[in-house]
Image (cartoon, rainbow, N blue to C red):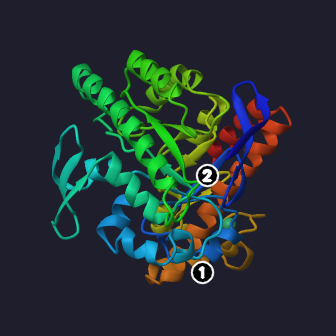
Amino acid sequence: MKYEIKALDKKAKSATMETVHGTVETPLFMNVGTVAAIKGAVSTDDLKEIGCQVELSNTYHLHVRTGDKLIKEFGGLHEFMHWDRPILTDSGGFQVFSLAKLRKIKEEGVNFNSHIDGRKIFMGPEESMQIQSNLGSTIAMAFDECPPALAERKYIEASVARTTRWLQRCKTEMDRLNSLEDTVNKEQLLFAINQGGIIDDIRISHAKEISEMDLDGYAIGGLAVGESHDEMYHILDVTVEHLPQNKPTYLMGVGTPINILEAVERGVDFFDCVYPSRNGRHGHVYTNHGKLNLFNKKFELDKRPIEEGCNCPACRSYSRGYIRHLLKANEMLGMRLCVLHNLYFYNTMMSEIRTAIREGRYTEYKNNKIRTMLEG
Ligand SMILES: [Zn+2]
């Protein structure tokens, strides 16, 4: 893996990252395909057409349904879902802590019941690495605990200390797996995750500690889980500077276009979020002049595309009025067109962000973009 910063505009960074699955340009938005599919009937061929650089799949979901061993039989996720560009898999930790039933955390890992069929499963750092190795993703995420945003200091301290011990175990296991003969991707990368709720000094000391462990990239987890936007920006202000600048900086699960614009300014260059696909499935579409709800009656006779000048597959051919009709008739094509537009909107915004950073006018770009989005 080669990560090279191409431009810095104050703290905003734009880099290239070379991987075994090709080179990507940052800042970038990873398009979320939970169970190796983008919800809304969007295929990997579609992803290429809408400018997706990295696809993200969920380890927990693929492990409990269909199974990572079966996917390994196909030659890993890339072969399984017909995608030759980078894939990031999360560690499963977030879903274990948010979805699974009757979980019990121990030093070794977590015992939980599958939310699909109730079956008992154990997942610790080693199991998470083994599953992600079977999936053969380009980037694996470390297995961590995401403590509740409002947990007490004592709980967060103990949890973060365990996350650090788990990170060491993830690293050791990943090195072992990458050395095995039948491993799908022997150059699988491992990103660490910074935790610490919204407590500055825990975030900072954890960031320093994991930075010394020399991982391939660094994520900030446990944000966008109920704290305010200002609290999130503040944590980025105090934390990012303690993570290595010469490695990818990933803000997990964030967020709205404005959240992304603010985080880029604070030095983040990897993002993922379910908003564009989830909102699209509900007929909510992003534009440079704010979000529209296509279910609204005022679009009934609207012959314009979702956004004038947008080059996505929906806007190239279809009117707001037609897409509204599809949504009202519960036709899958309505959802699909909205999801394609929204992902194209996010991917295009990331491309504009990269250009603005490389031309040294990021602040001006950001301020204009936010102003037009808020003015509507
Ligand atoms: Zn469009």
The CA distance from mark 2 to mark 1 is 29 Å
Is residue 243 placed above or below 295 in the rendered structure?
A: above
Give the residue at mark 1: 322
Q: Position of residue 78 (x, y in %)?
A: 56, 70
Residue 58 position in % (x across, y down): 42, 60
Q: Residue furthest top?
A: 201
Q: Quadrant of ligand 1?
A: bottom right
Q: Is residue 69 left or right of residue 88?
A: left
Residue 216's mark?
A: none
- Callout 1, which amino acid? Tyr
**219 relative to 186, above or below:** above
* Type of the residue with mark 2: Phe
Name the side, left or right, on which 143 lies relative to 156: right
Residue at 48%, 82% (x, y): give it.
332
**Residue at image location 62% in from the left, 39% down from the top:** 248
Q: Is residue 127 left or right of residue 289?
A: left
Disc 2 or 1, which lies upstream in sequence? 2
Location of mark 2 (residue): 29
In screen coordinates, is 65 left or right of 308? left
**Residue 34 coordinates in the image, percent (x, y):** 44, 64
Query: Under tag 1, what secondary structure?
Result: helix
Residue extending furthest right?
359
Q: Quadrant of residue 130?
A: bottom left
Residue 272: x and y in percent read 53, 50
The number of numbered discs placed on residues in the rendered structure image is: 2
Residue name at image x 57 percent, y 39 percent: 217
Q: Are marks 2 and 1 in contact (CB under 8 Å)?
A: no
Q: Nearer the viewer, residue 53 or 136?
A: 136
